[in-house]
Image (tube, rainbow, N blue to C red):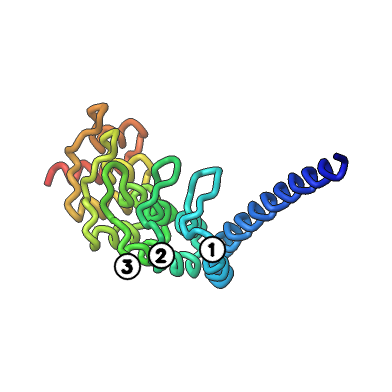
Amino acid sequence: MLSLRRLLLSFVLSLFAVSAMAQETVDDLLFAVRFNDPGTIETMLKAGFDVNTREKARGETLLMIAAREKSLKALSYLARHPKTDKEARASNGDTALMLAAFGGSLPAVKILVEAEAEVNQPGWTALHYGAASGSTEVVAYLLENHAYIDAEAPNGLTPLMMAVLFGKRAVVELLLEQGADAALRNQKGQTAMDLAKQNAREDLIEVLSTAVKR
């Protein structure tokens, strides 16, 4: 009877050990992505790990983590992997391309677009995020790749409105030059001009006033 109990205890302890080892290995995979180590990533994927593994805190996939951390070598490897879900969404609805755009990383955005990540998503888009980042390079590149300039978020915010809210004058000017509609209203009935006035951004009010007069 005693030996049976010992056997059962040993079995249970071995299960805990295997579980702990598996979690540690997943953590190692996430570490390799964050620290831009495609060699380790490739080795672990070949050993059977899922290329669409998610971390628990944000629900981000490996691709999203690489985009957010600007781990370009890891991002390039993952974006080209045939089983990577490039349109997967994190817990808050972000995609890898959105994260790259919000980070203002043109190289990361290029990697994902060239890997055929979807530029135009329903609701929030990479262009919204790029406008918020203030990167005119990212915004211009997305527009060159057919991003819809007046895309409306669920609350009615457009990329132009996002640029205004985040105080990104250069992006506001670029979007207006490229034909963004300054007369559109969000769900509260506010235009980009209203948002500029609400935030006392005299410089943006001036820019938008010129656009309205055209």
Residue 168 or residue 14, whichever sits in front: 14
Upstream in sequence: badge 2 or badge 3: 2
Residue visible at 35% across and 34% down in the picture: 200
**Residue that protrudes farthest toward the right in the picture:** 2
Residue visible at 49% across and 57% down in the picture: 62
Classify residue 185 by image quadrant.
top left
| Residue identified by numbered label 1 | 48
Image location of residue 153, percent across then percent down: 28, 39
Gap between marks 1 and 3 measured at Cα = 27 Å
- Residue 65 in view here: yes
- Figure quadrant of the N terminus: top right
- Check disc 2 and give the amino acid type: Ala
Q: Residues within 10 Å of mark 2 (few under 14, many from 20)?
A: many
Q: Is residue 34 left or right of residue 208?
A: right
Residue visible at 28% across and 48% down in the picture: 121
Upstream in sequence: badge 1 or badge 2: 1
| Residue identified by numbered label 3 | 114
Per the rendering, the mark at residue 79 is: 2
| Position of 63 relative to 152 (above/below) | below
